[in-house]
Each structure stands twice: as C-alpha cells, then as structure tokens.
Amino acid sequence: MSRHRNVRGYNYDEDFEDDDMYGQSVDDDYCISPATANQFIYSRQDRQAPREETLEEEEYEDEDVPLSPTVTHDLDPLDQAKLYSCLDHMRTVLGETMPDSVLTQAAMRCGFDPHKALDAVLSEDTKTAPVPKITSEETSVARVSQEKAPLPQRTKQEAVAEKAKSRDAPHSKVDSEVVPKVARMTVSGKKQTMGFDVPSTGENGVVTASVRRGGSPENATATSASEATSKRPETPSKGSNADEPSTVPTPGRSSGKARQALNIKAELEKRQGGKPLLNLVVIGHVDAGKSTLMGHLLYLLGNVNKRTMHKYEQESKKAGKASFAYAWVLDETGEERDRGVTMDVGMTKFETNSKVVTLMDAPGHKDFIPNMITGAAQADVAVLVVDASRGEFEAGFEAGGQTREHALLVRSLGVTQLAVAVNKMDQVNWQQERFKDITSKLGQFLKQAGFKESDVFYIPTSGLSGENLVTRSSVSQLTSWYSGPSLLEQIDAFKAPQRSVDKPFRLCVSDVFKDQGSGFCVTGKIEAGYIQTGDKILAMPPNETCNVKGITLHDEALDWAAAGDHVSLTVTGMDIIKINVGCVFCDPKEPIRVCTRFRARILLFNIEVPITQGFPVLLHYQTVSEPATIRKLISVLHKSSGEVLKKKPKCLSKGMNAIVEIQTQRPVSLELYKDYKELGRFMLRYVGSTIAAGVVTEIKE
C-alpha cells in the first residue's frame, strides 16, 4: 500500500508525461474515451475541471428527470404545471437530444404551447448567448447530422485530455455542456458515420474537411443532409461493410435491393466464369461404393493430390482396409473410417466443363437416413449408385434395402434428374445381360416413383478401378456394347435449375459453430434470395435479428451470395445458444412463418400400419427433424386429378393421397409449397422407415 499513501499531493500529469502507467501505455488504452478522461481524470493544471464536473452533474440530473423542480424562474403553480406538461410533450418528440434549459426557454417564450415551442427549437430561432452552438447542433442530431456533429467536438476533447491545456471560461462551459451528449451519441453515431462514409473515400474527405474548416453547425447540417440523400443509393451497391454491423445502413440497403436484384443475375453469370451451380447428392444402398466412386472421381479430376492419396492408401492398408483408400477422401472422421461406413453428409466441390458442382456424399446405412434427408433436401440432381455384383443389387433393391427408399426420398424432395451409376461392373466382367437386368428392374420402379424415363440415365462404372468415371472406358468388354457417356459427362449434361433469386432471402441452418473472432458461424444452403455482408437478417423461430459480418463459399470469402449457394455466414449481435440446426434465416421485412399446426397434402408409401388420428410421426423438413402427430384426417384425394374422394376418413392405408393436419411439439418455420417449392416439402417417418412425403398447403397458428 506504500505507493498509495501520498495520494493528495500526487501529480497525475507526471504519469501522462512518462507515458507509462503501471506498465501500460495511456495512449493505447482505448477503453477510456477522451470525453470520459476529461470528465473524470483530475488535473491540477486544468483549474476549471471541478466546475465543469458540477455543471455536468446538474445537466445529467436535468436530463434524467424531465419533471425537474429546479426551474429557477419565479412561476405560479399553474404556469409551472403548464411548463412541465409542455416539457413532457417536447421530450416525447425530441428524446434526450437537447438540454432542459433550451426547452424551458423555448416553452416560456411560446406561452407553454408545445407545438410552437417545438417549431421554435427545430427551426433554430433561439438566440441566447452561450446556447446557440448547442441548440443548432442538438437540433440537427434529430436529423441526418447526428453522425457528423461529434467529430469536431471529439477532436477538441482529445486535445484537452492529452495536452491538458487550460481553456478560458466560456469555452470550457460549452465543452462541459456538450460532453454528455457526445458520450451518448458516439456509440451509435460514429459507427453510423463510418457505415455511410465507407463507399466513397472522396466524399469522406470532403465531409471531414467541410465540417472541420467551417466549424459552424449550420454548415455541418447542410453538408450532411445533402450527402445523406446522395449516399443512400450507394450503400447497397458496395455491400462490403463487414466490420460495421450498424443499424442505419440497413434501410438504405434494403431500399436499394429492388434495384440490385436486377443486377444479381448478371453478377451470378459473371461469377465462376459463367458456369452455373449444380448441387449433386450421391445416394444408394450401404456398401454400394458411393464414397469410393466419388473419391476416385475427385482424385482423377485433380481435386486430391497424389501425396494425400498415397497417405490414404498407406493408412488404409495398415487398418486392413486397402479398398477403402478412395472412400477416405470423403469419409474424413475417425469413426467413419473405423467402421467403413459414411455417417454424415460429406461436402466438397469440383468443376466440369460447363458446371460448378457442389457434391454431397450421403450415408447409405438406414440408421443415418435423417442425415441423408438433410443432404437430399439441398440437392438439385442425384446420382443413385447400385452394386452390380450378384446378390448385392437384390439385397439393396428388395424390401428393407435402401435403394428404393433413397430413390423415393429424393423424388419426394424435388429431385427430377437422376443418373444411375451401376457400380462394381468389373466384378461381373462387364456383362451386358447383368446391366440390362438391373436397368429394367430399376426403370420400372423409378417410373412408379415419379421419374420421367427421359430424365433417368444409366452408366456402367467401376469405382475402384476408375473405369468410365472421367473419361470413356477403353475396356474392350465394355466398349463392345456400351458407347454412352462417362459419369462426369453425364453430370455435366444435367440441366441447372432456375434459382429463386428474386424472392425474399431464406437460408436453412445445417450447422452452427464458434469460429475465431467475434460472433459465430452458421452453414446452410440459401434457398431463395441473396445476401450481402453488412445485411441484417432475422432468425426464426427464435425471432432474433443479427448482422452478417462475413460470407464464405467453399472456403472463399465473398461480399455476396445468392440462392443455390452452400455458404458459411459469420454472424454477430446474437447469442449462439439461441440458434439450432433447422432454424431459418430470413429477410426481416418479409419473415418466414412459424407455426406448430399446418395442413398438408401427403402421399403414403408402403406402410404396414394404417394411419389414424393421433398417429405419432417424425417430421423431416429441410435440416429439421421434429416429433409430430397427425391431428386430423381431413380428406382422401384422387391421385392424379386431386378430387376429394372421401371426407373425414377413419384411417389412411398405403398408396393413398390425402390432406391431413399435423401438429409439431415445438414451433417450426414453414413456407407454403405454392410460394417456395424448396421450403414447402417435407417427409414423415415412423419407426425407422419413411411412410409419407408431403407438401404444405395451409399454415395454421
């Protein structure tokens, strides 16, 4: 405690001169603003400091208590009551932007008429000696100049704090009256200035010069008002205010969104050299060779280097799984490699001659169908991998196999184009009979599932040897009867779907994680609309708003992203606890609807137990899996025409098309199928098997 004894006689200015206070530089201490330092740090040289402090205290008391009885004018009780009601009325309009002394004088001069007093204050008619500077600046605060006014004052305060020069009495008086306002406004005010000034550096230079040179508040008000009008359209076109999650630019940006929505299609065409984006999911029965097939394809395309591939080969040999080397390209976790089974959706990208393809490798095991649904819900096209070896195709295709269920799921989730990779053909010596046998069985089933014959393509392949993946095969046993495209050529030939860029923004969260730095990251596919850095978005069902600080697409930082992109957003201004997988980020002006009850049209698959009222199901919607019950059976419909065949049925059996009402345990974010096809589809599962697919027709509360 020895260093604290001589407190009264201690000269604190010496610490500032030495520039070292307890081993820490004062200049580097950003926590204390110059205004606060001037207000609270005592300096012997600055004799006016104690008087300033008392003035500020009085001002704060005046501001915090609108009905302050410390009015120095001799008024009778009736006039005093009128004055207080007039002040109240003015406070509701102006808030805390003006000192009470200005409002009181204006009210008394206008005979306690609040409307006249407000007009007088806002038109800067008050002409008392020390106050005009404050009045004009404070009035402009209510308008656009709120951001500009603090700049000259801040520099003045910094000079006071750092150099500790004594000022003459009127100057210190003005400063002390202004200080609290600066302290209050700079939190939002400075950020807003930066938000508006970022787009044009030239303008920024002019602004600061005009404000500092002119010094008069009228000047600042005029320039800031004229700039606000010229800047507002510019803010959205840049869209790169990643560091300032400010509140003010948002209305400016959203007003410019309609104009920029016209350009977003042109921007999309420019990006990736004019190549459209395609989301591809790889599905099929467990052990059909999905991961090996796609891993080998990526290796042949050069997406995996030889050194990495050699490492995988050595490690897989050590583990006694030499044939799994290519699968390890996509199965990255230790558990997946130990078990030899894909468990989660692996995601990567590769390019063909005319497309940029986002590849999703879905798990084939029936225990991980919920993960597979998540992947399929984000896909535009699919590759169905079937095992050509004897007995394996039959095991996957017959009852209990995943080939049927996966094909039904992707069709129900909106995939219309399908490539069937008949894998492991080298094990049956590339026999044409086996290939025809498989295609005829599958073709019949896929037609029933709703695929058009013209949209289904069959390609014989070998994932392990790499035949017919990237280039057409040269194996004579195959070329003697097959002359069609390779797998990569077929993927390249798929038609890219239309993206809903013009609709309001929607993103379904598939993963949430904490990243380095402030905020946290969410990943997911943008289903509709587009987003820019600096945008404000709304998360539903939590109903919380947050700011987009950064956008990453395939590990590449971008200023914007549009529908169809699998992005990672860095989000600030919200607690990570409130976001779960399955939440939907949307445009705050046009939010997605949240409900626990909705009506839907469902198509029942092969179910063993008839569905009755109160039937428990698991609802799979985008990335959400939510327990639900079928509350009401409303009607049975004709499959093709949609006519009502029967109202209020007692039960529903397999193959029926019906309208039902579903209730979920927790609120879910849904869209109607007619508005957003991507967000209007769902699946129903019961005891480990998919029993129905449906579309949302009506949202209840």
Image (cartoon, rainbow, N blue to C red):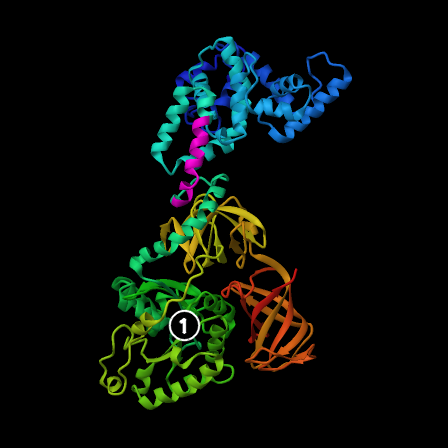
Residue 680 or 338: which is nearer the viewer? 680
Q: Looking at the image, is 88 positioned above or below residue 322?
A: above
The x, y position of residue 682, in whole percent, is: 54, 68
| Span highlighted in magenta in the image | 222-237
Q: Quadrant of residue 635?
A: bottom right
Coordinates of residue 690 in the picture (x, y in percent): 55, 75
Give the quarter of the image for residue 383. Answer: bottom left
Q: Is residue 434 above or below residue 677?
A: below
**Relative side of 336 to 624, left or right:** left
Q: Is residue 226 magenta?
A: yes
Image coordinates of residue 381 in percent, x first then y, are 40, 70
| Image-based side of 503 in relation to 638, left or right | left
In the image, residue 576 above or below residue 670: above
Image point (68%, 23%), residue name: 113
Residue sticking out furthest to the bottom: 433
Any part of residue 2 in sight:
no
